[in-house]
Image: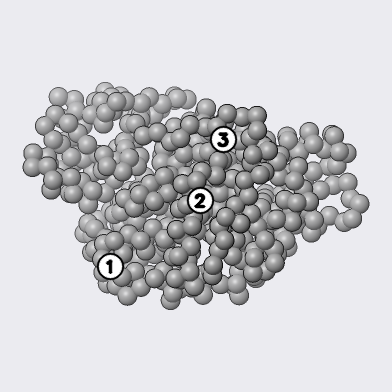
Amino acid sequence: MLGKRFIPLLPLALLLPLATACGGAADAEEPAGSRTVTVTVGYQSKTINTVTAGTLLRSLGYFEEELAARGKKDGVSYKVVWQDYATGAPITAQMTAGKIDIGSMGDFPLLINAARGKQLKQPTRLVSVTGYNLRGGLNTVVTAPDSPLRSLAELRGKKVSTSVGSAADGTLVRALQRAGVDPEKDIRKLNQQPSVGASALTAGSVDALSQFVAWPGLLAFEGRAKALYDGAELNLPTFHGVTVREKFAQERAGVLDDFLTAQRRATDHLRSRPVAAAESVAKETGLPAEVVHLYNGAQGIATFDPELRPELIDALKKDVSLLKAAKLVGDVDVDAFVDRAPLARAAAKNAPYPKASAARPELWLKGRSTTRTFDSPKALLKAVGGAGADVRAAYVPDAVTGTSWFADKAVWVAEGTELRAFVTPAGARAYVDGHATSRVVDYATALRLAAS
């Protein structure tokens, strides 16, 4: 089951104190007859797969533009208040207290959002998706760079940090179960905020960290961690989405439409100018642009598309059982939680985005506003060797899961004239075990082989 010993950080008793008046939703703050309407948006700046409904959207000003146009028609002045949080739990607390109108968060927190909203008679609705990965690659388990751990099975008796109730925790539980490890009895799970867990891993006070975007990529990029388990191995979709208070959606349907229209514009911007978007998000969050691009780039781990795709909603239904087992939610009627109508109105004049395609090796050179893709990992490494100090970042997809990773942090396998990359040592070892002529090589050797 999902870490019942650490439930106290998420129940209602602790969520409610977070619902302080640090902004104010439109219907809760504005007096009757006011010609100014405040719309409060909760987002997570460092959870960068929500940027089209948060950080990037805010910096582009598209929502304010849409509301300004509406205001000219109806004679109302609209004000947007943006509130930044580290996780989805405080956003849910503020929404159920009527203090936040629109929020974005990951799939597991969305279910808690639905449950809390119903419980407190402040129902919410899921109205769009921000970023998703159909295999689950947005969540990763990492260890210290010098850790001897090479597989999940070796976590028995070890201390593992995660955020209980998050999608990263769900990945940890499912992955351990598949590895034959009891996630409640066989490990010591610490319920920690992502930044706290990252510090704990660096300090050596935990043996592994299971977290969501962008923490695993950030720690790997900084040389403070290496991947132990790629969430895409579960082959279960994970995503982030936008939730709205039902009352707000009913009373301010046009405003919600404007938000979703603005989100669509931000999505178009990210998809057409991924490098510029990465630089923008990096400036706003303090994250390295190379890490942002790992997840949000054209070949990145996430695909951005507001559509409430059936496979994502089906995955959300499967997540309910894990949260119920942890006693974080009761029954959740996912179909009732999902409201497709607002997005349908906002997207009526737009063609649908294509589904996610397989990632390709990608090279980002210093001073360039675009990147270059390659047909094979070997071709990428040959270009990296030729570019030398001009390389800003090189990305390569895992040979099995397709999860993009930094080329210099990947585990490389040579087989004849071919070179393959893997996110984790376990993934590379599994391939080598099944291919007698293959062998694991270090990055320097892979570069040399690519050049020969």
Image height of 142 relative to 413, above or below: below
Q: Nearer the viewer, residue 2 or 59?
A: 2
Q: Earlier in the sequence, mark 1 or mark 2?
A: 1
As drawn, the label of residue 313 is: 2
Q: Nearer the viewer, residue 421 or 4?
A: 4
Name which residue type carries label 1.
Answer: Val
As drawn, the label of residue 267 is: 3
- The residue shown at (38%, 46%) is 135
Q: Secondary structure at mark 3?
A: helix
- The residue shown at (61%, 29%) is 350
- The residue shown at (14%, 29%) is 417
Please indicate whether residue 291 sits to the left or right of residue 400 in the image.
Answer: right
**Corner quadrant of residue 365:** top left
Density class for disc 3 (Cα within 10 Å; few <14, some 14-19, many ≥20) is many
Q: Where's residue 90, x and y in %?
A: 60, 62
According to the picture, the residue beneath numbered tag 1 turns out to be: 181
